[in-house]
Amino acid sequence: MKNILFIFRKQLKDSLKNKAILIQFIMHPLIAAVMTLSVHIENMPENFFVYLFSPMYITMAPIVSMSSIIAEEKEKNTLRVLLMSNVKSYEYFIGIGGYIFLICMLGAAVFCVLGKFAGIEILYFMGIMAVGILTSIVIGGTIGTASKNQILNTSITMPVMLVLSFVPMLSQFNDVINNAGRVLYSQQIFNLINHTSTLDFKCESIIIIVVNILISAILFAVLYRKSKFA
Amino acid sequence: MKVIETFNISKQYRNTTVLDKINLEAGKGEIVGVLGPSGAGKTTLINILTGQIRADSGDAYILETSCVNLDCKIYSKIGIMMDSFGLYERLSVYENLKFYSQIFRISSNRIEYVLNKTGLYGARKTLVQNLSKGMKARLNLARAFLKEAELLFLDEPTSGLDPQTAQHIHGLIEEEKQKGTTVFLTTHNMHEAEKLCDNIALLCDGKIVEYGNPQKICSKYNYMNVIDITLKNGEKISLPNSPKSSDKIKQLVESESIKSIHSSEPNLENVFLLLTGKVLKQ
């Protein structure tokens, strides 16, 4: 448990000096805030920018940050040193993942404030954001584990991130994309978030998200067993 | 008690044999060196001994534990300085050591001690990304020295460093030996090996071509066994290294005509060249 805390603190110090990671956490909440406060179009749906940017945030920030932190640690051999220094793999994963989860939940709180949610709406919105962030962290961890260096990591992360974040948005305009995208957790998160004000959620969404988490976790376990973060 | 023991370790990458039936051992408080040119298999050997990779055949033990079963308990007793630094570039020197002292469960007082010993105290607030290669090597070593390890693995500890820094690091390694720490070091620097090691293995193309005490190895290959004398007038003479030459040497000493006098004993570089036909340099 102590090691998790030490890794968490180390990562916090490190990320404050790492602009590439820092920007991932700030970008979407900031853009959503600027757009919400400055853009007012007639007949624009309520909380349009919050519902648009929050699903993008949870599919981009955790995946990019988790995968790039692991890939950088592998490339610079710091992860190898750590694993030979009284740190277990799961402690490292929870330390880094826990840090990203907390920072992303702060970002989710910003969306919550922008959406002016109240009472049960806050719980509903934050709960869905938490599930989405956790799923993305596992996916980010899987990509980081599969990548031997940062260049390879970027080339895997980019297409995965673009598909997961843009399919939900594009599915609003195209039925084919909508049908294909239903199997993605990001599409289901998008649908659930868009029903925050009505608190309406379908069991199908939950099942699809759980299946996505399971597939990601299995993939991570297989890749980890193969490479052991090496 | 043997701190390091290997029995016929072999390792292949694709079809290339990197290590071929390596047998080594080191007792408590000994410095064992592996001397060889780049690509000889030195780092692979360290990686096997520290459990980072597995040998294809043979057995290796450190601290009486098989190297394929090393756990946190064993890792807490060993210090490792790898060829790649593995430091957090965006953290300062102190923050790096502080983080590892927390992981090793070591008091912060030890950080000050190690910083002073490695000459890094003045640079403790400097970010690692702003350090020179020599300073990074010192920090890498400082991290290995942070815990009072029973066994230290040092992979080319002075590679690419200036002579002054290298000498400072040699002093630190000798201090650790005095404390009873066993040191396993790899190097391609014969002076370093001769100066520090109780025993060395000359490694070439994955094979140990000679193993033993450096002085004994050099004596073993002293085939010429002569004494070379340079006189003040520039004349050079070679005399057999035997009692027969004592009168002549005495005469030269008394006449104060000797400029320099050397035995013909080869150094490790010569022995390596003799045995492998290769030079030690990178």
Image: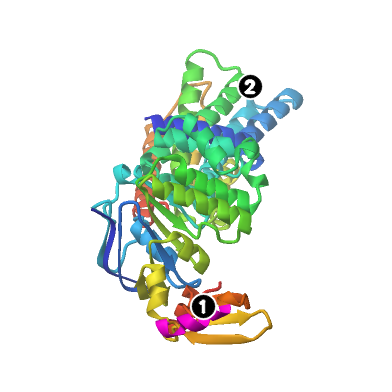
Q: In this picture, which residue range is highlighted in magenta?
A: B242-252
Asked if marks 2 and 1 fall on the same chain, the answer is: no
Residue on which disc 2 sits:
A114
Report whether residue A212 is seen: yes
**A112 over B5 or under it: above or below:** above
Q: Is residue B246 magenta?
A: yes
**A211 over A40 or under it: above or below:** below
Residue B75 pos. (x, y %)? 35, 46
Residue on which disc 1 sits:
B250
How packed mark 2 is, by other alpha carbons closer than 10 Å (few <14, some 14-19, many 20 or more), is some
Residue A164 pos. (x, y %)? 53, 45
- Element type where label 1 sits in the image: helix
Residue B7 pos. (x, y %)? 25, 67
Residue B23 image-quadrant placement: bottom left
Report whether residue A133 is seen: no
**A123 over B105 or under it: above or below:** above
* Residue occupying the point 43% across, 51% down: B80
